[in-house]
Image (tube, helix red, strand yellow):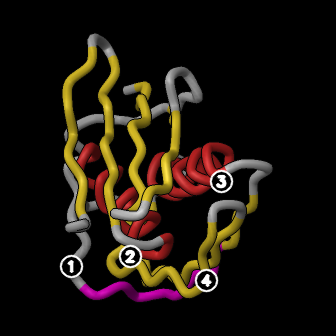
Amino acid sequence: MKGGFRVLPHTSEMVLEVRAPDWPSFYRAAAEGLLAVYGLRPGKPGTRELRRSVKGGSAEETLVAWLAELIFLVGTKRTVPAKIEVTQAGPLELTAVLRVRPAQDLPLEREVKAAAYHGLKVEEKRSGIGARVILDV
């Protein structure tokens, strides 16, 4: 399975489709997809390193917790992950190292309020991992 993401319009929300061959790639693609919804792209070197770990009772809870952490960093802390390295990952937890930079000078195309559980299903198959998550924008 080829990794990556696709963003689709969905009424006043957006749908983020994530597909990847393994859990670390899945969570990294989800993060990159979320940043794309903001109109941001990883790239310019980050000035600070942050370590983030999230856990959930299911793959869906873990994905939402991960996206919520990133939404908090961008939306509240105005910090943009410039490099995302998922160092440990599985369906119920992940640990990532983020190189971040301030976002004050970066215009956001839109604000993301939350990742929704409505209709969320993370599926692990022989070909890889996939999910569709609705983002409230």
Amino acid carrying mark 1 in the image: Gly
Tell me which numbered mark, 1 or 4, is placed earlier along the sequence.
Answer: 1
Q: Is residue 55 magenta?
A: no
Tell me which numbered mark, 1 or 3, is placed earlier along the sequence.
Answer: 1
Q: Which mark is residue 135?
A: none
How many residues crowd mark 3 within 10 Å: few (<14), some (14–19), many (20+)?
many
Amino acid carrying mark 4 in the image: Gln
Give the percent coordinates (x, y) of residue 21: 35, 70
Amino acid carrying mark 3 in the image: Thr
Q: What's the distance in space between the residues labelled 3 and 2, CA to CA?
A: 25 Å
Q: Nearer the viewer, mark 4 or mark 2?
A: 4
Q: Which mark is residue 88?
A: 4
Residue visible at 58% across and 81% down in the picture? 50
Residue visible at 43% across and 36% down in the picture? 133
Give the percent coordinates (x, y) of residue 71: 50, 48
Residue highlighted by disc 3: 62
Residue visible at 27% across and 35% down in the picture? 110
**Magenta residues: mostly which secondary structure?**
strand
Q: Which mark is residue 101?
A: 2
Amino acid carrying mark 2 in the image: Arg
Q: Nearer the viewer, mark 3 or mark 2?
A: 3
- Looking at the rendered structure, the secondary structure element under dot 3 is helix
109 lies left or right of 71: left
Q: Which residues are magenta?
A: 45-52
Residue highlighted by disc 1: 43
State which quarter of the image contains the N terminus.
Answer: bottom left
Tell me which numbered mark, 2 or 1, is placed earlier along the sequence.
Answer: 1
State which quadrant residue 11 falls in: top left
Residue visible at 59% across and 45% down in the picture? 64
Q: Is residue 101 above or below residue 111?
A: below
Label 2 close to label 1 by CB (< 8 Å): no
